[in-house]
């Protein structure tokens, strides 16, 4: 059963007040790193898995992509995306990421920002991404980092007086469901080890071309002092992979 | 200045009493995973960086390799290696890993077990490994995992009564020297992020073919109950990479 937390009115309302929901890509600390992983998008056909408000779809279109399809499970997210989009090259589909069904070789690039840690079967999604990519197509993805998802609490270990002592890791090898409390109670995420992310991509027929664990720029920390501890542990894992011809 | 802790008599003595020093590969919990990364070694010319007692050199020779060169900075380690080796296909060189200087394309495989976290400049070593590998050569390496090296203490966070609460991560993005206390005071290791390990290999011209974060087998935990917490966080990072032709 796929969770659709973003269509929960209370969750949606809380999410809509996040800096990145209001301010878009410029308020997402990992955006410069993620953007750097994107290939030249001119004339390309691109799929965005878990597109949310459509910020990335609109950015991709602005780079002169030929077409962009944004997929999301949430009707509310897509409603907001459509209200903010005036570009006929961008289409939105309400579908769970796991359920995509596009023709083989349809896309030059598949993109996914902070959505795949909500997906139970990463291997099945990778297979679908591989198939719907054209030869030499590119898959650029970000997820919450395994260091960040290993414990469901996703909280710093704090001293009695509230100092952030360190980031706790535990149950790292126990992959699977995590009942987290992110913006609301019981938001279901899936923890996977780094080895699983990498080897699943390799087993599907991808080559890894870059892996990033970005931290906010000094400028972003100056503007957002609450980000000062972000260099103490990685929160995001970004991977760029290329479709390799299967032997 | 390269540290040569293994030639410190007290450190050497302590190291020589470790289970893996006495019992060899079968006592190393990561050995089955590391072994699985090795290519077919029949007739191959192999280099082992940081060979220590030569356990891996002798294993590689036992797989019908044509020749094996083991390199180590420590005279004491190599003395023990030579005393335990009766195979003329195996040669040992006393050299720091950073100072290797072999002809281009000399080896079919380069191997390194738990030595590269002692090396300051991973990029320079990778370049040398790339050059001394033949076309389509394989580089198989293990290091202490970045989750394990981020804090110099390398200790569980414990409750007042000595329970292991979780593994602490901090200073993850601050790469560089760690003054650890492993078997002795001030053993110098180098922390690198996962992104640095992966991207350095890619930038040198390698393709990643597999990445492992092994945990001890149930059988090994039964024999060594002190390993029961090893699945709570990864301690080792294993990478297999292939030499790709440079464009």
Image: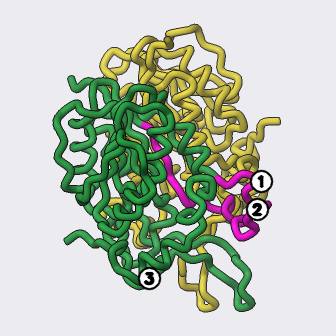
Chain colours: A yellow, B green
Specify whether disc 1 shares its chain with disc 2. yes
Give the residue drawn at x 46%, y 43%. Answer: B239
Name the mark on residue B223: 2
Q: Chain of mark 2?
A: B
Q: Chain of mark 1?
A: B
Specify whether disc 1 shares its chain with disc 3. yes
Q: Residues within 10 Å of mark 1 (few under 14, many from 20)?
A: few
Residue B216 lies in the magenta stretch? yes
Q: On the rendered image, what quadrant is the C terminus of chain B found in?
A: top left
Give the residue drawn at x 76%, y 55%. Answer: A179
Picture coordinates of residue A97, whole percent (x, y): 65, 29
The residue lying toward the viewer, choosing from A34 and A191, is A191
Of the two numbered discs 2 and 3 on the same chain, state the one appearing first in sequence. 3
Picture coordinates of residue B208, whole percent (x, y): 42, 35
Residue B116 lies in the magenta stretch? no
Tell me whether the residue at label 1 lies in contact with that at label 2, contact meaning CB atoms closer than 8 angstroms: yes
Q: Residues within 10 Å of mark 2 (few under 14, many from 20)?
A: few
Picture coordinates of residue A133, whole percent (x, y): 49, 16
Q: CA distance from mark 1 to mark 2?
A: 6 Å
Against A52, is A214 above or below?
A: below
Name the mark on residue B219: 1
Query: Regarding mark 2 in the picture, which secondary structure is present there?
Result: helix
First to last magenta residue range? B215-240
Give the residue drawn at x 72%, y 51%. Answer: B217
The residue lying toward the viewer, choosing from A142 and A166, is A166
Q: CA distance from mark 1 to mark 3?
A: 30 Å
Q: Which residue is mark 3?
A: B184
Tell me whether the residue at label 1 lies in contact with that at label 3, contact meaning CB atoms closer than 8 angstroms: no
């Amino acid at each position: 059963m796929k969770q659709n937390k973003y269509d929960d009115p209370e969750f949606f309302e809380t999410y809509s007040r996040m800096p990145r929901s209001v301010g878009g890509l410029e308020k997402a600390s990992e955006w410069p790193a993620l953007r750097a992983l994107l290939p030249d998008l001119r004339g390309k056909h691109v799929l965005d898995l878990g597109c949310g408000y459509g910020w990335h779809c609109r950015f991709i279109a602005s780079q002169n992509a030929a077409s962009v399809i944004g997929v999301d499970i949430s009707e509310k997210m897509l409603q907001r995306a459509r209200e903010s989009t005036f570009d006929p090259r961008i289409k939105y589909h309400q579908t769970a990421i796991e359920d995509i069904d596009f023709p083989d070789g349809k896309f030059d690039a598949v993109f996914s920002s902070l959505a795949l840690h909500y997906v139970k079967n990463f291997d099945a999604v990778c297979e679908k991404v591989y198939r719907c990519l054209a030869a030499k197509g590119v898959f650029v993805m970000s997820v919450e980092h395994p260091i960040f998802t290993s414990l469901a609490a996703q909280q710093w270990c704090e001293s009695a007086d509230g100092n952030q002592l360190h980031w706790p890791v535990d149950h790292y090898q126990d992959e699977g469901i995590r009942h987290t409390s992110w913006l609301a109670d019981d938001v279901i995420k899936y923890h996977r080890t780094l080895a699983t992310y990498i080897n699943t991509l390799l087993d599907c027929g991808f080559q890894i071309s870059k892996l990033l664990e970005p931290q906010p720029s000094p400028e972003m920390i100056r503007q957002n002092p609450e980000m000062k501890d972000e260099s103490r542990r990685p929160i995001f894992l970004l991977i760029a992979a290329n479709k390799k011809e299967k032997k």
